Image (spheres, helix red, strand yellow):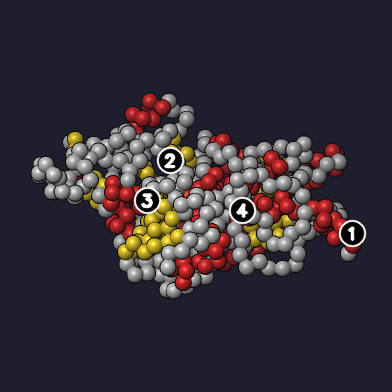
Amino acid sequence: MPSVTLPNEVSVVTGVLPGHHGVTGIQWFEPNRLIYRDYATVSQKNMLDGDYTAATLYEQFPGRPTLSLFFQAHRGATRFDENATYAGASYFMGWFEYIDRMTLSMFRDVIDSARSTGRFPAATVCYLLSPDFYAYHFGVETEQYRESLRHTDRQIGRVLGDMQRAGVLDKLVLALVSDHGHTPTPWHLDLRAFLREKAGLDLADDVLWESTPLEARQAAYDKHSAVATVCGNRYAAIYLRKAIRPDGPVGAPTSRGEGASQPQARTEGNSPSLEPWAVRPSVEDLKSYPSRGGRLVDLPGLLAEQEAVDAVAYSAGPNRVRVRRSGGEVEFRQEGGPGAGISYAVLSGTDPMEWHGQLPPEIRAGAKAPPRRWLEATLETQFPNLPVGLLAYFRSGRAGDLAVFAAPKWDLFVENRSGHGGLRPADVFVPMLLAGPGVPHSTEGVALSVDLAPTLLKLMGRPLPSGMDGVPMLDVDDANHAKSVTRSQ
Ligand SMILES: [Zn+2]
């Protein structure tokens, strides 16, 4: 959550949920520091590793080589191959399969250097992008996409074949995982245009970060009321300045009878007066937000009633998240903080999440349930694991004041045939394959992407760093025990 690339890349190598490690999107805005991050730009892409502090897989093997092959989250790796020389041009030409073959060909260097130094890398993480881009460009229900999957499968097979011939394959733990799903998006809502035209927000277009002095960033962003980012095209974050409300809560009767019964924001010229960016809007602000011309807009309500919008989520205070849909609103609470029990209440409507009684009775009755119980309870629903990821998301200072998720078949931008970032099974479910010494031949019903890092560390006999959201999956054995099992076979 959100089901987009870089938040999940960081989660795969840290075992920490995106909201807790802080990389909440490919783009995010941080109202406190007035920084707009866009990792899709050449100037900012390598800032990723400075934006999270959670310990990485690479850092768990001191004194041993660790490699990242084109995998952007690589803090602590002794070597990072990003291959800008060939990837840049090929990317623009759309030669995604060529990029993946070049990335995989770097395994040759891995083996060569292992031969010359006598030390095999403790961990190598490799990123292949071709299926993602074929899905965007052609759609997931096309022969082109299928062919890109076959290509990926074939190329991974070539590398594994080489490893087998070199006699190292059965000594390695292999993991294959994706960062997100993909789902067809034949219909588009240009969310940024909608926010300007229909919601009357004054969106900033500036992309300013640490390279611009703070005062200049302030001058630029203070001219606007909102910042909006769209990632994977099915997830958007909207950041809003709090409105100054001289008359107290809007709509509340005034004891002094100053004629404030007609709710209206104070305006200067055409735009309402707003607090500095560091002051965050309240639930009331979101529900009666001053738009152009002094009109007050219920932003979650307006967005939720759009056909393109599946759900709008926002924080209702620490450890409290609300989800607004066209059929009503629910609230999740995790008062004990990360890892604690989560309770749920319907605030309006009868069954806004369309859970149709799929939730266990005690959860429906409002009892607290542990996060893994929620994972199981929501697994077969249209919103798998929704509360756990959302509660984590809104703990980040880079979470939108509103998080908007696209309805099935829709995205929130204008150009692609497929997308991801939403809350649905097609967005959030990914395959995860594991093989190697200590891995039993079995299938797990469900695991989280954040479970992969602790599982790998356990398999390799390393201690788990504190603060992980993930837990080791399967009945895996640590490295020493695995060796004795292997010997006895
Ligand atoms: Zn991706």
Query: Residue, x 75% and y 54% (percent of image)?
Result: 459
Q: Which residue is nearer to you in this view: 152 or 312?
A: 312
* Distance (Cα) linking label 1 and label 2: 53 Å
- Image-based side of 447 in relation to 310, left or right: right
Nearer the N terminus, badge 3 or badge 1?
3
* Local crowd size for mark 1, using a 10 Å CA cut-off: few (<14), some (14–19), many (≥20): few
Report which residue position mark 3 lands on.
316
Query: Residue, x 52% and y 50% (percent of image)?
Result: 338
Q: Quadrant of the C terminus?
A: bottom right
Residue mark closest to the camera, 1 vs 2: 1
Nearer the N terminus, badge 3 or badge 4?
3
Q: What amino acid is at disc 1?
A: Arg
Report which residue position mark 2 lands on.
29
Residue mark closest to the camera, 3 vs 1: 3
Q: Which residue is nearer to you in this view: 421 or 414?
A: 421
Q: Which residue is nearer to you in this view: 130 or 121?
A: 121
Q: What amino acid is at disc 3?
A: Ala
* Distance (Cα) linking label 2 and label 4: 26 Å
* Local crowd size for mark 4, using a 10 Å CA cut-off: few (<14), some (14–19), many (≥20): many
